[in-house]
């Protein structure tokens, strides 16, 4: 793949041996400007000189590119459409098929908020539907430490602010300022490290095969250049079951609409292939 480098990307690659050319230019420039301001560099040339001089600043800059921010029920409209329309529809289809398991891939799961939010919805559905069903959520991220954090499922009060009280009481145990996800909710979630740029595999090995009813690919596409977004969306597409859904962040809807996807409900960030 042909790579375009900015002068600072070239500098970092030369100094650190790391390749950051896959990041979107706007994101990269914004990150550079933020670090330049934080280090009181008045010009980009001055900041480039600082990067050249200081290994610690190079590391800080590289770390600033790793954004793991997430929220439970991050986009309320998306989660409402999932809860009220998409998951019940999926279940209805399962009732007519021999495979009564809903398979979901949270492909950039950060500390697990997205996977745990979905597990709460599915557990609640299990309690209200007459026909029993199973589900499995494969939650992956390329960052090992973040996946470890997700497995532990410890959150502070601020992190669970979008979770209603009933759900907090049902799914978390409180220990001082820390809320820990109950084992019961973790049972159907398989956390593992997986890089979406892996050229050999189209879905996490722990899932054995793709065939996902829903793939969540939220709030990471906009960090990358078009060719890398293509790679991620192609992987997501390949791993979906025939009538499966793709979910993205709300700021990524326009990106996805340029591909072979159609939004199933306006503004929802939930798509199916044309
Ligand atoms: C901003 S967080 C979004 C988390 C969650 N999906 C959400 O919408 O709240 C982006 C996550 O994508 C992960 N990520 C970035 N590039 C990745 C890649 N190539 N493969 C897998 N995960 C990646 C990061 O490690 C980070 O945890």
Image: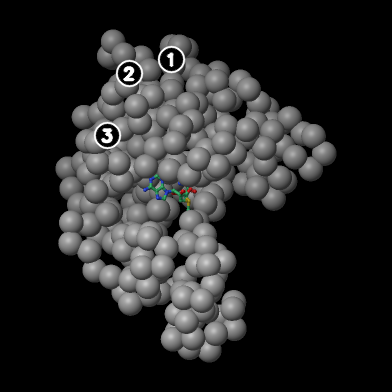
Label pair 3/1, CB-CB below 8 angstroms: no
Q: Nearer the viewer, mark 3 or mark 1?
A: 3
For the question of whether residue 264 can be seen, the reply is no
Q: Residues within 10 Å of mark 1 (few under 14, many from 20)?
A: some
N-term mark: 2 or 1: 2
Q: Residue at x 59, y 83 (%)?
A: 40
What residue did someone put label 1 on?
A: 133
Is residue 60 positioned above or below 265 on the image?
Answer: below
Residue 252, image x, y percentages: 35, 56
Gap in angstroms between the C-alphas marked 2 and 1: 8 Å
Counting the numbered discs, the total is: 3
Residue 36, image x, y percentages: 52, 79
N-term mark: 3 or 2: 2
* Label at residue 201: 3
What residue did someone put label 2 on?
A: 94
Q: Nearer the viewer, mark 3 or mark 2?
A: 3
Element under label 1? loop
For the question of whether residue 141 can be seen, the reply is yes
């Amino acid at each position: 793949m042909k790579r375009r480098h900015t002068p600072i990307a070239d500098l970092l690659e030369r100094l650190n041996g790391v390749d950051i050319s896959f990041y979107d230019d706007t994101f990269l420039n914004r990150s550079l400007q933020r670090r330049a301001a934080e280090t009181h560099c008045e010009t980009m040339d001055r900041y480039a000189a600082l990067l050249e001089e200081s290994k610690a600043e190079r590391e800080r800059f590289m770390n600033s590119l790793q954004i793991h921010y997430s929220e439970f029920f991050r986009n309320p409209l998306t989660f409402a459409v999932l809860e009220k329309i998409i998951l019940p529809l999926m279940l209805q289809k399962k009732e007519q098929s021999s495979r009564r398991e809903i398979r979901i891939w949270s492909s950039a799961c950060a500390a697990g908020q997205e996977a745990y939010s979905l597990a709460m919805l599915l557990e609640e559905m299990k309690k209200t539907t007459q026909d029993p069903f199973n589900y499995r959520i494969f939650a992956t991220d390329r960052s090992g430490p973040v996946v470890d954090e997700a497995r532990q499922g410890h959150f502070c009060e601020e992190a669970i602010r979008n979770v209603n009280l009933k759900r907090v009481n049902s799914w978390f145990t409180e220990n001082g300022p820390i809320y820990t996800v109950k084992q019961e909710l973790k049972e159907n979630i398989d956390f593992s490290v997986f890089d979406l740029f892996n050229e050999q595999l189209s879905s996490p090995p722990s899932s054995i095969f793709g065939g996902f009813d829903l793939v969540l690919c939220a709030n990471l596409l906009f960090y990358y250049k078009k060719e890398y977004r293509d790679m991620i969306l192609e992987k997501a597409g390949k791993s979906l079951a025939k009538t499966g859904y793709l979910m993205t962040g709300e700021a990524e809807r326009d990106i996805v609409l340029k591909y072979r996807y159609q939004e199933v409900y306006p503004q929802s960030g939930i798509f199916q292939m044309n």
